[in-house]
Amino acid sequence: MKQTEKYYCEECGKYLFNTDKPRGAAGFLAMDLGFVYKMPILFGISGSHFFCCKECWNKWLAKHTTPEKREEGDKAVADIRQRMAARQPELWRGLQRIQDTLEKKRKQ
Ligand SMILES: [Zn+2]
């Protein structure tokens, strides 16, 4: 039998959802459901965290970081976003290749 794990907002304690999926997949599920899933490694915090809304995430972040750390983290996030945006065509081509390969495998 699969173990179901319950997820709660780490700031206000609100119950979010439960799933038997691994934590990474639960993150995607959380985002699908409109919740906030974060891996605040850029803010010097390890692991992945779940929140019911952006306000809770911001409150939680303020409690767990210093203004300096947040500024550093924000800069790092903006930097990564910029780099990802610049590389998007490349990423799309990469995805397309993966899809093509899968499609070919399926047809064989
Ligand atoms: Zn909350």
Image (spheres, rainbow, N blue to C red):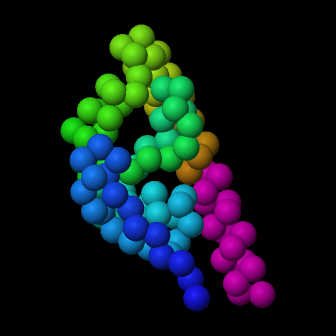
Q: Is residue 99 magenta?
A: yes
Viewer-proximal residue among 78 and 108: 78
Question: Which residue corresponds to the image point at 67% horizontal and 60% vertical from the top-left?
Answer: 97
- Relative side of 9 to 104, left or right: left
Q: Total marks drawn?
A: 0
Viewer-proximal residue among 63 and 99: 63
- Relative side of 44 to 33, left or right: right
In the image, the segment drawn in magenta is 93-108
Q: Main secondary structure of the magenta part?
A: helix
The quarter of the picture where residue 105 lies is bottom right
Q: Is residue 80 visible?
A: no
- Residue farthest to the top? 68
Question: Which residue corresponds to the image point at 61% horizontal and 57% vertical from the top-left?
Answer: 95
Question: Which residue corresponds to the image point at 72% horizontal and 69% vertical from the top-left?
Answer: 101
The quarter of the picture where residue 22 lies is bottom right
Q: Is residue 39 above or below residue 32?
A: above
- Residue farthest to the left? 55
Q: Is residue 39 above or below residue 13?
A: above
